[in-house]
């Protein structure tokens, strides 16, 4: 969904409960994790609305510089920085300086992302390896590509801005082997750009960095959404496996409708039930997407190629759901632009699916029907359950790094307001965190959803193993403000006698010195 920062923020709430993919991804059939293989996509070209076939990529030609020679200056490199990992390089230049695609590929995400302000993610093939390049800190008005667009290396895709957590106008550029949205491996862009740095072309013309260059053969990918616009925004393993590939494909049909929304709608409609014995509503709605017979007659097609058009078939139903929602989203958009409707376009689209576009148009907004209003609110709130944090630029855990990643997860929210009772496993709530809400989120996220702390500092003290404070390592929890029921405060040790914590009302998440009376526990 690209309806603005508020909508993107909604996706983040609850999104950290997923099991993430591997640290790399290839075109082989060997699974990198159960339920998460990098598998061949055998969909016939053009079946999913893209004349080239969704997820179909030609191997890229030579890599090029993301900014023209002489227009920017390297101000920050790849690796440790300010106590955390800087997963890209910073190229400083005046606002409006052109940014170019480094590789041929497909734009799979455009819009607001945590820390980046606004970003662009492009999926590409380098030889036979899936690679994502990431471009950050542009202003929305500086974007020159749309989600789903095929681009070529050297194409002008955006202009330098100073959006998000930025210290001045610059391009933040990342290079990920295995896919940025798939939990791949960030590589030093300077190493990948080594050939390009020696060139002098206006858009960074280079010699190839891949032996053999581009191949004539085309490869088709379905690596938990790699190469599919919006496909990587669905968290791995959070929907029934037979639904996952269809949701990723249906969520690539138009920029406004993405897989997490479709998944939340399927849960609300019929809890992913399908087949001959799936429940039929009292009104006669059928299948996982609960199509009424007249609506199905218009939108149903044999998307799965089994020779039948079946509203109880996963493929047929999910693809029809995606096409229908995209059509409604477009119709709502035209009416909204004409001043005929008010309100959030996505809310209006869901209301149209439930009550009909005629009712939405008649009331110039979401109709005052209790069922429809509950339907819209339930789906929007449930979307977060299915969204991958990486899709919004958030921290993606690498379990080989252990507890230190707890620090990385918490540092994403430096400067976030303290809110009493705020936050939890899913991230901030009511606009912020309290101390134990922050630690709950950071530990749950860093453990890839495998460890859920109790909600209060007193109960968190019972988890893990107490260690001497002078043996504490980054990622250990530190407790203080002791009372008769235990610790009244908790933070995350960052090293050198310091911690990240949410201190008190009126303050923000900050990194500061330990309190005098603190004790430490190792939970991961």
Image (spheres, helix red, strand yellow):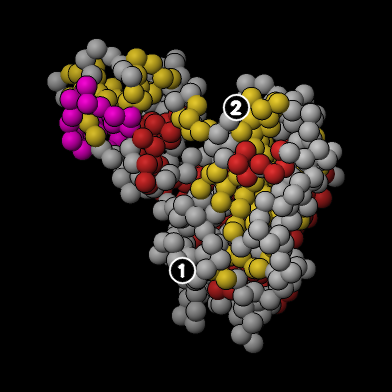
Viewer-side residue, 397 vs 287: 397
Q: Residue 319, image x and y in percent?
A: 64, 69
Q: Which residue lies furthest to the top in this view?
A: 516
Above or below for 505 versus 370? above
Above or below for 263 versus 155? below
Residue to which mark 2 is pinned? 76
Q: Can residue 362 be seen in this snapshot? A: no
Residue to which mark 1 is pinned? 30
- At x 62%, y 21%, the residue is 167
> In the figure, is residue 138 to the left or right of 279?
right
Circle 2: element type: strand
Residue 253 is one of the magenta-drawn residues = no
Viewer-side residue, 228 vs 338: 228
- At x 51%, y 50%, the residue is 184
Above or below for 233 versus 494? below
Viewer-side residue, 314 vs 121: 121
Q: Residue 5, image x and y in percent?
A: 63, 36
Q: Which of the 4 quarters of the picture holds residue 469?
A: top left
> In the figure, is residue 441 to the left or right of 154?
left
Of the numbered discs 2 and 1, the one sitting upstream in the chain is 1
Q: How many labels does the image show?
A: 2
- At x 46%, y 55%, the residue is 21
Q: How crowded is mark 1: few (under 14 residues within 10 Å), some or many (20 or more)?
A: few
Marking on residue 465 = none
Q: Can residue 398 be seen in this snapshot? A: yes
Circle 1: element type: loop
Which residues are drawn in magenta? 454-477
> In the figure, is residue 143 to the left or right of 191?
right
């Amino acid at each position: 969904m690209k309806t603005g920062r508020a909508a993107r923020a909604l996706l983040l709430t609850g999104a950290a409960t997923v099991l993430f993919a591997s640290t790399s991804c290839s075109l082989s059939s060997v699974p990198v994790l159960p339920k998460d293989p990098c598998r061949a996509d055998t969909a016939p070209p053009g079946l999913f609305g893209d004349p080239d076939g969704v997820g179909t990529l030609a191997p890229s030609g030579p890599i090029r510089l993301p900014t023209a020679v002489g227009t920017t200056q390297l101000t920050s490199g790849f690796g440790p920085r300010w106590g955390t990992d800087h997963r890209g390089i910073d190229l400083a230049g005046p606002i409006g300086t052109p940014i170019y695609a480094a590789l041929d590929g497909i734009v799979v995400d455009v819009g607001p992302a945590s820390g980046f302000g606004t970003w662009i993610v492009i999926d590409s093939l380098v030889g036979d390896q899936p690679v994502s390049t990431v471009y950050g800190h542009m202003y929305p008005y500086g974007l020159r590509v749309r989600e789903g667009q095929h681009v070529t290396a050297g194409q002008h895709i955006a202009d330098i801005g100073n959006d998000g957590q930025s210290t001045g106008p610059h391009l933040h550029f990342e290079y990920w082997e295995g896919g940025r949205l798939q939990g791949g491996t960030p590589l030093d862009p300077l190493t990948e750009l080594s050939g390009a740095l020696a060139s002098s072309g206006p858009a960074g013309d280079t010699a190839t960095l891949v032996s053999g260059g581009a191949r004539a053969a085309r490869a088709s990918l379905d690596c938990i959404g790699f190469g599919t616009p919006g496909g990587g925004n669905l968290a791995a393993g959070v929907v029934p496996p037979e639904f996952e590939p269809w949701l990723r494909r249906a969520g690539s049909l138009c920029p406004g409708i993405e897989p997490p929304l479709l998944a939340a709608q399927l849960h609300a409609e019929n809890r992913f039930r399908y087949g001959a014995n799936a429940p039929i509503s009292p009104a006669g709605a059928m299948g996982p997407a609960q199509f009424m017979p007249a609506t199905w007659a218009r939108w149903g097609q044999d998307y799965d190629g089994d020779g039948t058009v079946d509203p109880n078939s996963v493929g047929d139903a999910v693809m029809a759901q995606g096409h229908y929602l995209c059509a409604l989203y477009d119709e709502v958009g035209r009416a909204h632009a004409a001043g005929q409707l008010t309100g959030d376009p996505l809310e209006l689209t869901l209301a149209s699916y439930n009550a009909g576009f005629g009712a939405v148009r008649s009331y110039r907004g979401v109709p005052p029907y209790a069922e429809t209003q509950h339907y819209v609110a339930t789906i929007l709130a449930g979307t977060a359950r299915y969204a991958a944090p990486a899709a919004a630029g958030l921290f993606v855990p690498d379990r080989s790094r252990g507890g230190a990643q707890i620090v990385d997860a918490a540092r994403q929210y430096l400067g976030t307001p303290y809110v009493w009772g705020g936050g939890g496993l899913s991230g901030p709530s009511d606009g912020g965190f309290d101390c134990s809400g922050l630690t709950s989120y950071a530990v749950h996220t860093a453990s890839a959803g495998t460890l859920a702390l109790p909600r209060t500092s007193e109960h968190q003290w019972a988890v893990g193993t107490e260690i001497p404070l002078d043996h504490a390592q980054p990622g250990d929890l530190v407790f203080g403000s002791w009372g008769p029921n235990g610790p009244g405060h908790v933070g995350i040790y960052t090293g050198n006698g310091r911690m990240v914590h949410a201190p008190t009302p009126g303050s923000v998440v900050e990194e500061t010195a330990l309190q005098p009376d603190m004790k430490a526990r190792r939970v991961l």
